[in-house]
Image (spheres, rainbow, N blue to C red):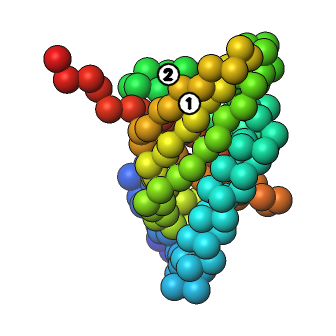
Amino acid sequence: MKTTKLIFCPAYLCLLAFCIIVSCKPGHEKFSEAEKTFVKNSVDNLTKNIADDVSKKGPRAWLNYFEDANGFFMANQGKISFEDYRAAKMFILNNLVKNVRRIKLKWNNVRVDPLGPDLASMGAGFHEDITDMSGKTISVDGYFTGLAHYDGIKWKLRNLHWSTPAAIN
């Protein structure tokens, strides 16, 4: 009686592993229009809450809306201002609250692009009246972009970028 030996080629093993992985992968859940609407409305509310809280409670309120997680960063005028939440928190508590008495923040033309049930891209024009400790107020207009993330409890900003129009010489 003749016996046959099975020969296992590494390429066949890789192909077999790939087929098993692909066939066991769950189907992608469709992101429904109702879910997209819910995300859009939730992130619109986030912008309203940010403006209300920062205007009523001052710059410290920003910390309630920055995500304290890996990946957080903030850029301003095309440069990284805060590489992580810790740096943002230190600046706000050690500098901003000591130099800024009040901020009045208003958004305009808020745009929200739902990316998933817990993630949205957002952008908006902004106007801030910033009052320092001496009572002097400066007005700033510009544009904000960011990524909003639902952390299981509430929506927070995972990253953000502020810019103001450049002066034309």
At which x and y percent is residue 91? 71, 17
Taking the image as shown, residue 40 lies to the left or right of residue 66, namely: left
For the residue marked with disc 2, what is the amino acid?
A: Ile
- Residue that sits furthest to the left in the current view: 169
The disc at residue 74 is 1
| Residue depicted at x 56% and y 79% | 37
Q: Return the x and y of residue 65 as percentages of the image width and height.
A: 72, 44
Does residue 75 appear in this view? no
- Cβ–Cβ below 8 Å for labels 1 and 2? yes
Residue 78: quarter of image: top left
Q: Residue at x 61, y 44 (%)?
A: 105
Q: Name the foreground residue: 6 vs 65.
A: 65
Q: Position of residue 103 (x, y in %)?
A: 67, 35
Q: Secondary structure at mark 1?
A: strand
Question: Can you identify the residue that label 2 sits on?
Answer: 80
- Tell me the distance, in whole angstroms, between the alpha carbons under discs 1 and 2: 6 Å
